[in-house]
Amino acid sequence: MRVGRRRLLRTFAAPAPLPTIIALLPAVVATLALLPASSGGRPTHGHAASAARWGISDDSPALFEDPRFGWLKVRMARVVMAWDVMHRPAELAWRDQWLADARAHGVEPLVAFSYDPRHQRWLPSLSDYGKAVRRFMRSHPWVREYTPWEEENHYLQPTARDPRRAAQYYNLLASDCRSCEVTAADVLDEPNMTSWVSRFLHYAHHPRIWGLHNYIDLNDGTDAGTLRLLRLVRGEVWFTETGGLVWRYERLSRRYIVRGSRYAARAASRLKALASTSRRIRRIYYYQWRVPLTLAQARRGRVVTWDSGLIAPSCALRPAFDVVARVLGQNPARAPRARRDRAGECVASRRSR
């Protein structure tokens, strides 16, 4: 029975004999228990539970050395690298270490390609892109999951102006590795998402998996962007990046937007329900594990422009970690302790939490 809370309460607005009210009370309580919790005026849709698998999106090899990562029993992780990483020895060594550590820990890697840091607005030709990614795949045959280009509709990405080229990258990668899982597009839930994906669909060959970074939905407590993509495309949807914001640097306004760790935890607590909007949502990669710099340090150097980490720079657990741990069936009170070593990384502590 679908009865709104206000309608149900209006039913008992008129005076009634006390015995009648008492007799009806169990039925009222049972009906209220079946109604969805209030969403503060926000739209809510979804199934009773989400079957999505959880992973972590973070580029640091130190992720695998943190004892809390292994304790969570996460078996998926995502890394972003330049599309021409094979021509960049320093970055390649860093990414190879990440991939080797993932493999050693039994973690399934999702590799997402992106721009060359030296030429951020340059979109490579299909030939150059193909040669580079084929070379990478030949060198890393155990990697079976790819994203051709990340955040393709973001205004700073060169793919934002050329959905056709982005679709060609997908077609090439999916054709070259038919046994791989390849996300067709990897988009942010920004206003231009619908128009961008619509144009992408004209050129993509039979896409089966889509990547979504639904930061707006998660942090604003909505599901509008997620539902828009679900209506627009067929196949699986993976939340390839999503997380509760602690702080970020806004390039356009040149200021820091600070939300705090408790705000991030409240956002993280909405993630399971957001993933339950459709059974087609099959994966969640939480971004990110840890930023090594504090906000004060970031303000001075502006090397880091985003923090949605589950772990604080001090290596302490943030409230969002507790949220994610509980979703994964773990008791956060039993998480192992960690400390910062001399290199600034989180390593196991002998003391229990």
Image (spheres, rainbow, N blue to C red):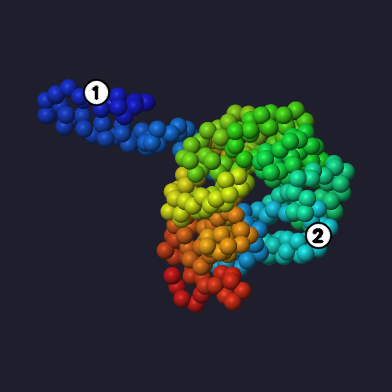
Report x, y in % for residue 315. Answer: 52, 67
| Viewer-nearest residue: 188 or 107 | 188
Report x, y in % for residue 30. Answer: 29, 34
On screen, 181 above or below 99? Answer: above
Q: Say which residue label 2 marks.
A: 88
Residue at 71% from the left image edge and 38% from the top image edge: 160
Give the crowd class for mark 2: few <14, some 14-19, many >=20 residues within 10 Å.
few
- Left or right of 326 in this view: 130: right
Task: From the image, state whether disc 1 or disc 2 is nearer to you.
Answer: 2
Q: Is residue 70 visible?
A: no
Residue at 70% from the left image edge and 41% from the top image edge: 152
Report x, y in % for residue 164. Answer: 77, 33
State the CA–CA distance, disc 1 to disc 2: 70 Å
Label 2 sits on a secondary structure element that is loop
Residue at 63% from the left image edge and 34% from the top image edge: 193
Contact (Cβ within 8 Å) of mark 1 with mark 2 = no
- Residue type at mark 1: give it: Thr
- Left or right of 201 in this view: 272: left
- Residue type at mark 2: give it: Arg
Q: Is residue 197 visible?
A: yes
| Viewer-nearest residue: 254 or 237 | 254
On screen, 58 above or below 273? Answer: below
Label 1 sits on a secondary structure element that is helix
Image disc number at residue 11: 1
- Left or right of 24 in this view: 279: right
Locate the C terminus and report the quarter of the image it occupies.
Answer: bottom left
* Mark with earlier residue (1, 2): 1
Locate the N terminus and report the quarter of the image it occupies.
Answer: top left
On screen, 304 above or below 350? Answer: above
Report x, y in % for residue 204. Answer: 76, 33
Residue at 21% from the left image edge and 29% from the top image edge: 24
